[in-house]
Amino acid sequence: MSVLLSLAARQARLFALRDVIDDGGGALWFYTGAPPSTPEDATAETMLAAVQLDAVSGAVGAAGNVATLTLAVPRVNLVTTSGVTGWVRVVWGAGVGVMDL
């Protein structure tokens, strides 16, 4: 059975995701290599950069019938080393993983 959600319901899911990211201060962490199995798992990959997101990390909207979450311009950027980005972890609070991209 398929579950088809309305645009409003899909946007509500993104508002909830944004609220989790914003709880305690969200950030993007850029790593080399491949991501672990889940965002809860630690990684041995090298962190290349950390980007602190604004207090409200982004705006929920729509492009046609697609719900979107557009992240705001970051406040602080910290480049820790050079390398090729393999993946990005979205974190909240004290670095707790929310999702890996």
Image (cartoon, rainbow, N blue to C red):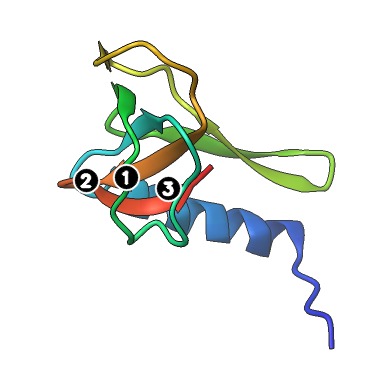
Of 20 and 32, nearer the camera is 32
In the rendered image, which quarter is residue 36 located in? Answer: bottom left
User: Is the Cβ of the residue at disc 3 closer than 8 Å to that at disc 2?
Assistant: no
Q: Amino acid at mark 2?
A: Gly
Q: Amino acid at mark 3?
A: Arg
- Above or below 52: residue 78: above
Q: Residues within 10 Å of mark 1 (few under 14, many from 20)?
A: many
| Residue 84 visible at all | yes
Residue at the spot 80% in from the left edge and 72% down from the top edge: 4
Q: CA distance from mark 2 to mark 1?
A: 5 Å
Which numbered disc, 1 or 3, marks the residue closer to the eye?
A: 1
- Looking at the image, residue 96 sits to the left or right of residue 2; the answer is left
Q: Position of residue 82 (x, y in %)?
A: 36, 11
Residue under circle 2? 95
Q: Is residue 53 visible?
A: no
Give the total of numbered labels: 3
Q: How many neighbours does mark 2 have within 10 angstroms: few (below 14), some (14-19), or many (20 or more)?
A: some
Q: Dividing the image into 4 quarters, which one contains the C terminus?
A: top right
| Amino acid type assigned to the residue bearing label 1 in the image | Val
Return the residue nearer the eye: 34 or 91: 34
Position of residue 21 in the picture relative to residue 35 (left or right): left
Residue that mark 3 sits on: 18
User: Which residue is under mark 1?
Assistant: 91
